[in-house]
Image: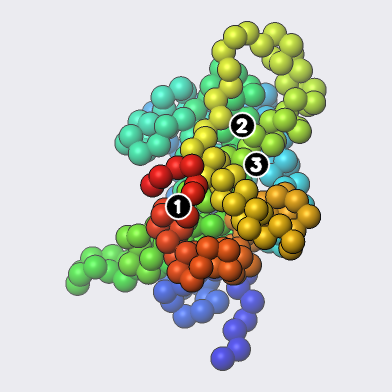
Amino acid sequence: MEEGKFEHPFIDNLVGIPHGDSEVKNATGKSVEEYMRHTGSNKHEGVEIEKTPEDIEIIQFAIDSVNEVMKEYGREKDIELSMNHIHIVPVGGTEIVTQGNSKKAAQASTRSSLIIDRDPSNIQFCLRAFHEILHLKSYVALQILPPPEENSQSSLKAYRKGFMVVSRDGKERYFTDLEEGVIGMLTEKFFNEKIKSEILFSEELKNKGEVPFEFSRQEEIQLLNDLVDQIFEKNIDDFKSRDEILELFIRAQVNGNLLRVGKLIEKTFGKGSFREISEGNYPKDTHHDR
Ligand SMILES: [Zn+2]
């Protein structure tokens, strides 16, 4: 069957409804696009704070930097992200709004929006913005789940987010470590290669006290690095450097195509190993026993 190209400002694909039809109404009576535009720009009443011109400048720097990463790794789609889908809250606000599910920052692919605690450090604030924007602008597919019972409503859920895969009942999530590992690693790279030489942050860097910046997802970054090292060791004749392998993982996260990484993992660790990793079971000699 021929399928038309799926055009949507916020997502790469939508499953669970006739293919390519972005006008299908969901439970709210709005099209998926209208629904995402509406819920994504909804302010968090009583918690959200107005963005200052400085906040906007920092966020824009994070957006531009994410766009550069997307381009570098061959991402063709540019997911729309306007300032009113980015919500700033005081320190501790994210935890309140997400009812304890997230701390300091979070994003929602079903709304294409994000929320960030306004850390007093501009750099810390920017690092968190970059991390969440990278999640949002990576490959994303959503699914519409049918109503669980009669008279209830269908719901819009994540289906794919970069590396991450969600089961078609919306309950199981796979490859979450790799998604966070790649994003965490790219956020550290962003700090070293962009923030450190950016005039916007020179004052803060100069006056930096003892308090270190917080880099999240250290455990996932370690898992990713271990995996890449092992693959490189076992395929030393096929690759010039470990960075070549790392690049395959970054491309998979950004473009959502897991095929090449999957094949390489199966070739390296044997049949079924990609599935094992999807569930968080890493090859035996990875440092982390999980
Ligand atoms: Zn994350």
Residue beneath label 1, please?
284
Disc 3 designates what residue? 186
Distance (Cα) linking label 3 and label 1: 26 Å
The one of 146 and 235 positioned closer to us in this rendering: 235
Tell me the crowding category of disc 3: few under 14, some 14 to 19, or many 20 or more residues within 10 angstroms, Cα based. Answer: some
Q: Residue at x 66, y 54 (%)?
A: 232
Q: Going 62% across and 81% down the picture, which residue do you hit?
A: 4
Q: Position of residue 124 (x, y in %)?
A: 59, 25
Q: How many marks are shown on the rendered structure?
A: 3
Q: Secondary structure at mark 3?
A: helix
Q: Which mark is residue 69?
A: none
Mark 2–mark 1 Cα distance, whole angstroms, equals: 33 Å
Q: Amino acid at mark 2?
A: Leu
Nearer to the camera, 29 or 227:
227
Q: Secondary structure at mark 2?
A: helix
Residue 32 locus on image (x, y percent): 48, 64
Q: Residue at x 56, y 57 (%)?
A: 162
Question: What residue type is disc 1 on?
Answer: Lys
Report the front residue among 56 and 131: 131
Q: Is residue 245 visible?
A: yes
Tell which tag, 2 or 1, sits nearer the viewer: 1
Q: Earlier in the sequence, mark 3 or mark 1?
A: 3
Classify 10 Å Cα crowding around label 2: few (below 14), some (14-19), many (20 and above).
Answer: many
Residue positioned 24% across, 68% down in the render? 148
- Quadrant assignment for the N terminus: bottom right
Q: Amino acid at mark 3?
A: Leu
> Horizontal placement of 73 versus 155: left or right?
right
Q: Is residue 29 above or below residue 233?
A: below
- Residue picked out by circle 2: 127
